[in-house]
Image (cartoon, grey):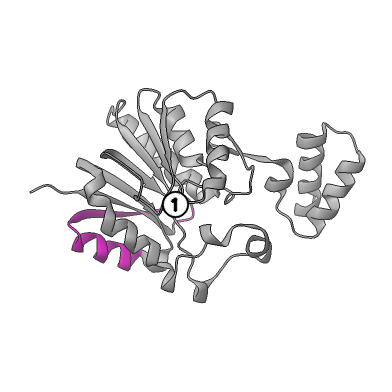
Amino acid sequence: MTPEATEVAWLLKEKYDGEKTEGFFADCARLQAGEPLAYLIGYIPFLTSTIYLDNHPLIPRTETEFWVNEVITELTTRNKESFRALDLCAGSGCIGVAFAQAFPKATMDFAERETRLHPTIQKNLTENHLTNSGAIYGGDLFEEVTGRYDIILSNPPYIDPALCRAEQCVLEYEPHEALFGGEAGTTVLGHIIQRTNPHLAHGGQLYLEHEPEQTAFVREYGMHFGFMVDTRPDQYGVERYTCLTRQDV
């Protein structure tokens, strides 16, 4: 079965319960035109969660799913259960929702500049039966965030416009504000690293997704601001995220 046929079969099963209605054929035409399958179905699995994509946030990627699972496993091994965590540049809230499911004793907050996505985050919390969530903040990065966190997780905009690997359908349908990270894709990454320390508890950690070409920048900038840095690969062996730990002298 071709990838296109697989997507059509998935659409028919997941959204139309096997019935070839007028709506199904209309969606097939939209799929043929390049609209992402996840938007047509309206949700996507992410670890043990179901993530709804109302208002079209960035579609969660498998690379993000991989490193989030790695962090969950790491914290579980360290017997870390009760802590404060923040999903920064939350989009759909997929990272925070997965964390809230994995750590029901933790308090999970979200920060997302696009307020149109706040109802989407709330829906994902509600539909996944989560009650351990705290605030959903707006504003630019930490602008409205209060308090300190033990864990901050972020999949920020980091695509370099000059080195864009995104497929045409991604560029056409997914929100550019969630994709592009300024010059060399490092503008938002730099702002996050620069502003994180006052929002981390002693020994707190920031987990930051980025491109492999941005590893040197993230590491150097992180060390400049006093973090201990540890860059890690995704499931394809590509440097995909860095753990920045606050060091208190």
Instruction: Residue 119 in the image: state x and y as whole percent.
Output: 56, 38
Rendered position, 187 above or below 208: below
Residue 235: say if magenta.
yes
Q: Nearer the viewer, residue 202 or 55?
A: 55
Residue at the (73%, 55%) spot, across then down: 35
Q: Nearer the viewer, residue 125 or 115?
A: 115
Total marks shown come to: 1
Check disc 1 and give the amino acid type: Asn
Residue 48: say if magenta.
no
Residue position marked by numbered label 1 in the rendering: 155
Residue at the (46%, 41%) spot, across then down: 95
Instruction: Residue 126 in the image: state x and y as whole percent.
Output: 55, 27
Residue 2 appearing in the image? no
127 sits left or right of 234 in the view: right
Residue at the (31%, 26%) spot, across then down: 81
Rendered position, 141 above or below 20: below
Magenta region: 215-237
Residue 14 appearing in the image? yes
Q: Callout 1: helix, strand or loop? A: loop
Instruction: Residue 245 in the image: state x and y as whole percent.
Output: 23, 48
186 sits left or right of 227 in the view: right
Residue at the (52%, 47%) spot, across then down: 115
Instruction: Count neighbours of disc 1 (C-alpha within 10 A) and say few if under 14, some if 14 to 19, many if 20 or more.
Output: many
As drawn, which residue projects farthest toward the bottom?
A: 162
Rendered position, 166 above or below 13: below
Q: Quadrant of residue 199?
A: top left
Instruction: Residue 247 in the image: state x and y as whole percent.
Output: 15, 49
